[in-house]
Amino acid sequence: MTTLESLLIELIDGQKLTQANLSNLRQKDQVSFRKVTVKPVLVKQELKYQFTYHFEKKTTNENLTPSEAHAKLRDLLQTVFRQAMLHSQAADHQVLISKKEKVTILKQKATKANVELVHDRKKKYLLAEGKPVPFLIELGVMNQEGKVLAKKYDKFRQINRFLEMIDDVVPFLNRERRLNIVDFGCGKSYLTFALYHFLKEEQGFDLNVIGLDLKEDVIRHCNALATSLQYDNLNFLVGDINRYDQLEQVDMVVTLHACDTATDAALEKAVRWGAEVILSVPCCQHELFGQIENETLSPLLKHGILKERFSALATDAVRAQILELVGYRAQILEFIDLEHTPKNLLIRAVKQKSKGDVSKLAEEYRAYCELLQIEPYLESALHDLLAPLLAQRS
């Protein structure tokens, strides 16, 4: 005769349990949860049993070893619940406990024979955890064994999110020649190093990557690190976006925290270079804040913080529309906050082989600017390219 203890030994200790559901409280006010479910999970490749406690408006979890799970299930059935359904690969076992503590176990056909151990499943990053990456080690994100340091995990996620966006545009990059890539306002260059490593070491592109920033000490540090890593075609220069003219043609432009119209200056450079790919995380969009006027929108615009946020979104919409007008396919994607700025939108633009009819885009742009009574910097910067397209604008 099967007893509760022998059943727990068979299913828990024998690692045959696929799911358990405990219900029918002995006393309604005895505990604050109403039912408990149990399933096997993998935590760092070790089998655990996840107990989920179902409260009225929330759930909580705890992961227990097989021996701990055995003891916990026994305690819950002896003191809290009068009913349980224990599923295994071979059979279902319904456990019923009477008010006189008589235990009845009914064996039934298996209904949950298969289980997928998915808990603690690692996200598949392009730069995988556990695999040492030289630049991540040098930047203090990983240790020598490839373990991501806890305090740098957000940076690790940010780098991988950035590389996912790079990976999406790889098909648009030319593998037949050396590519010129410029990162305006590169700062400490975590993402510049990531871009170089991914495209050069992982994807096999021939690259010339330039990082540009105004801070001389930062540039010295980045150049020393590039030399240490033997990244021969990654160089950092002290310079201003508006004045940089050392390349006649650039394939990719990256600008991740250029402030206010410095972002527009970088976008203008990218367009005039005919860059195949543009990646931009704008920052501190103040330009349109002082321009936007619309009486109908006064309930929004009269509040400074709302006007500021609206102006930032309005600015990014302008940039995306202008890029589409001059021959790009533009997307605005969610990024991960940079340490330099709380902005988390990224403009990704890919040059199209043919521009096609942009009359509808032009009409939309004209109406948009007239509605908000704005004259964007980027439109002025690209006036020679946009004027023929916006000729109807009054």
Image (cartoon, grey):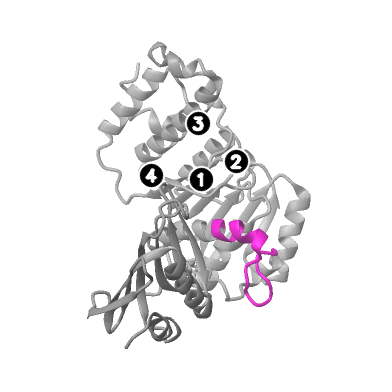
Q: Amino acid at mark 2?
A: Ala
Q: Secondary structure at mark 4?
A: strand
Looking at the image, residue 334 sits to the left or right of residue 99; the answer is right
Region rendered in magenta: 139-158
Marks 1 and 4, Cα distance to the nearest angstrom?
A: 11 Å
Q: Secondary structure at mark 1?
A: strand
Q: Disc 1, disc 2: CB below 8 Å?
A: yes
Of marks 4 and 3, the one in the foreground: 3
Where residue 140 sits in the image (x, y, percent)? 70, 64
Above or below, 312 relative to 193: above
- Please give the label number shown on residue 354: none
Marks 2 and 3, Cα distance to the nearest angstrom?
A: 14 Å
Q: Secondary structure at mark 3?
A: helix
Of the residues under marks 1 and 4, which one precedes in the sequence?
A: 1
- Please give the label number shown on residue 330: 4
Q: Amino acid at mark 3?
A: Ala
358, 42: nearer the viewer? 42
Q: In what quadrant of the picture does the N terminus appear?
A: bottom left
Of the residues under marks 2 and 4, which one precedes in the sequence?
A: 2
Residue neighbourhood size for the residue with mark 4, other residues' Cα within 10 Å, grouped as few (<14), some (14–19), many (≥20): many
Q: Secondary structure at mark 2?
A: loop
**The residue positioned farthest toward the right in the image shown:** 217
Q: Provide the residue designation for mark 3.
A: 312
Asked whether 47 falls inside the magenta stretch, the response is: no
